[in-house]
Image (cartoon, rainbow, N blue to C red):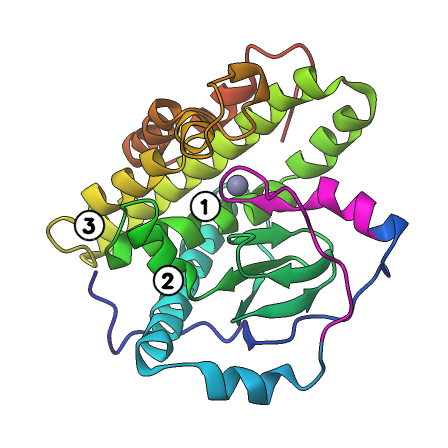
Amino acid sequence: MKWKNRRKSSNVNRGSGAPIVFGGGIGGLILVLVLYFLGADPSVINNQNIDQGQNSQYEEKISEGQKELEDFLSVVLADTEDMWHEKFSEYNLTYNEPNMTLYTGSTKSACGVAQSGMGPFYCPLDQAVYIDVSFYDELKNTFGAGGDFAFAYVLAHEVGHHVQNELGILDQTQELQKKLSEREYNKYSVAQELQADYFAGVYAYYSKEKGYLEAGDIEEAMRAASSIGDDKIQKMSGSNINPDKFTHGSSKDRKNAFDMGYKYHDIEHSMDFYKNLEYKIQI
Ligand SMILES: [Zn+2]
């Protein structure tokens, strides 16, 4: 992706995020429900207290390569801001930009303590995307999806959850989560995740139109989308493939959702993921 010497977002924080709204204990349990992950949920979210002064720690830990990744993600975030401002204005809506916190090790979010190993996520309570920059290596080495645009897809997916928040979709699905069984709710979770993948496809189309893409970029994003499907992750963790337990969609569905976003690049078609579900989700 062509990203050097382009605008970087000013909504980027390093190391420590917004103040914690909830403490540990029960708060920690509630929080699991409101985080939006990139792939299968981590089994444990640790809500313990962490060291202060993370900013200086962060500076020490960060390598040259990570600094470049930070700059890269800041440019991608800026692109998503420009794009979503445009899209929202088509619907006479105002887009409020999310924040992005980049960290290594762990940091605080309004949804609890963010730790590497959790993977990138979106916290609706402070409207921020949390990314451990070392996830870039994990994406490449563990999931076999390297390349800069694979990481751009990851951020565009998380920003997609913010867009859902802005459109009131997260509120509606959280209400349903209270009354549905886990198995029933998982269908809404999958629809929501596929919509976020769709939004990442919309971003890919936007980047292409702007002339930012290089050869192989779209393939990198598609490889990333299909590398983190629930079926693949269940298989990697040694479990049997069980679609009832899917929360993000199969590899095939995730790649298709990205393709659809690239093809239609609008908000209307993204609502198709909810259309066969019992309760209506509206924007
Ligand atoms: Zn997600």
- Is any part of residue 97 visible from this angle? no
The residue positioned 89% from the left and 48% from the top of the image is 26
The alpha-carbon separation of the residues under discs 1 and 3 comes to 16 Å
Element carrying mark 3: helix
Whether residue 40 is in magenta: the answer is: yes
Q: Is residue 161 left or right of residue 169?
A: left
Q: Which residue is mark 1?
A: 157
Q: Quadrant of the C terminus?
A: top right
Q: Which mark is residue 217?
A: 3
Q: Is mark 1 within 8 Å of ligand 1?
A: yes
Instruction: Tell me where residue 136 sits by quadrant.
Output: bottom left
Residue named by callout 2: 76
For the N terminus, which image quadrant? bottom left
Residue 12 lies, with reference to residue 151, above or below; the image says below
Q: Amino acid at mark 3?
A: Asp
Residue situated in front as seen by the camera: 132 or 208? 132
* Snapshot quadrant of residue 143: top left
Circle 1 SS class = helix
Q: Which residue corresponds to the image point at 32% horizontal and 30% vertical from the top-left? A: 255
Crowd band around label 1 with a 10 angstrom C-alpha radius: few (<14), some (14–19), many (20+): many
Residue drawn at 59 percent across, 44 percent down: 42
The type of residue carrying mark 2 is Val
Q: Magenta residues, as a range?
A: 28-50
Amino acid on which the number 1 mark rests in the picture: His
> Mark 1 to mark 2: distance in Å?
12 Å
Q: Comparing marks 2 and 3, which lies closer to the viewer? A: 3
Q: Position of residue 213 (x, y in %)?
A: 19, 55
Q: Give the crowd class for mark 2: few <14, some 14-19, many >=20 residues within 10 Å.
A: many
Q: CA distance from mark 2 to mark 3?
A: 13 Å
Q: Looking at the image, can residue 24 be seen? A: yes
